[in-house]
Image (cartoon, rainbow, N blue to C red):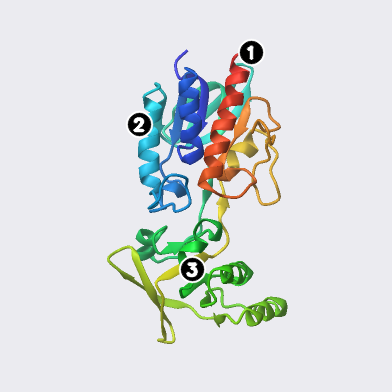
Amino acid sequence: MENYYDCIIIGGGIAGLQAAIQLGRYCHQTLVIDSNDGRSNLCNRYHNLLGWLEGVSGEELRLSGKKQAMRYDVQFVADYVISAAKQDQGIILNTKSGECYQCKTVLLATGIKDHLPSFPELIGCLGISVYICPDCDGYEVKDSRVIVIGRGEAGANLACTLTHWTKDVVYVDEEMKVLPTKTKRKLQEQELTYKNEQIEKVLVEEKSQFKGIKLQSGEIIHANHCFLALGGNKVQSHLAEQLGVYTTENNHVLTNHRTKETNVENVWAAGDLVAHSEQAAVAMGEGVQAAIWIHKRLLV
């Protein structure tokens, strides 16, 4: 049957690629549908992955992962899945380009869309001198000045979290609303600098080195590191919801902790889409774990 596969993986990021490699090694007919706009495209350097002493970019991981999967005859399509439904013959997927695909099993690895500030200069700095995740990159600001560009309590909480590595934290709250008294007190206790003001300009050198910000008041704050905490990141769980998959209050997908299968038979999920710590290493583990159990199902 044309466009019919044992498994279709939606999302070609870290989790999707790791699953694709494993399924390819099982010799299953596997297709990866990827829109090429996942968050791993933006990270210019992962610092905390085993074996990469100087870090590795998301782009490098994706390119090498795709080449590796293609060695095992995994197919790739650049497209965007707009609808998913279960039918008697399996799972039906329709894409933005008008294609229709069918599969026995599906792995959702659609991830999260980050809310980034409207300063395009920051894109080249992501993972190098501008960060999002303190668990991934808090160490990079150890004993250094860091600016947190954030909104409300999300930014305040991140600023306080970073005091584990450095006490020189400047929190710039772009939301410009009054923080709750409890949150203000927490910032004061940590002796953080708090600015409730819009940013006029971001200072960047050589496309990837953050150097500071200029506030609308004209004040310039210098720093070589920046964290972003704007809130409002979008969990890409719309396909999961179409299939009847259970999600948490913040739209993360719920899976069986052992198999990574959702409550809907033959529908798996892995990576940042799932309710867990948003780590590349975790995404890899979940990808291969899901693939193992998809393989077991396909043998039935």
Secondary structure at badge 1 equals loop
Of callouts 3 and 2, the N-terminal one: 2
Query: Above or below — where is 64 with respect to 3?
Result: below
Please identify the quarter of the rendering in which residue 163 is found. Answer: bottom right
Secondary structure at badge 3 equals loop
> Residue 102: x, y in percent?
52, 21
Which labelled disc corresponds to residue 67? Answer: 2
Of callouts 1 and 3, the N-terminal one: 3
Q: Please, what is the three-letter code of the amino acid marked with disc 1?
A: Val
> Residue 109: x, y in percent?
54, 38
Q: Please, what is the three-letter code of the amino acid marked with disc 3?
A: Lys
Mark 3 crowdedness (10 Å alpha carbons): few <14, some 14-19, many ≥20: some
Check contact, mark 1 vs mark 3: CB within 8 A. Answer: no
Q: CA distance from mark 3 to mark 2?
A: 36 Å
Q: CA distance from mark 1 to mark 3?
A: 52 Å
Residue wearing tag 3: 142
Which marked residue is nearer to the observer: mark 3 or mark 2?
Answer: 3
Which labelled disc corresponds to residue 8? Answer: none
Q: CA distance from mark 1 to mark 2?
A: 29 Å
- Quadrant containing the C terminus is top right
Query: Above or below — where is 216 with respect to 45?
Result: below
> Residue 184: x, y in percent?
66, 80
Query: Above or below — where is 175 with respect to 191?
Result: above
Residue wearing tag 1: 300
Mark 1 crowdedness (10 Å alpha carbons): few <14, some 14-19, many ≥20: few
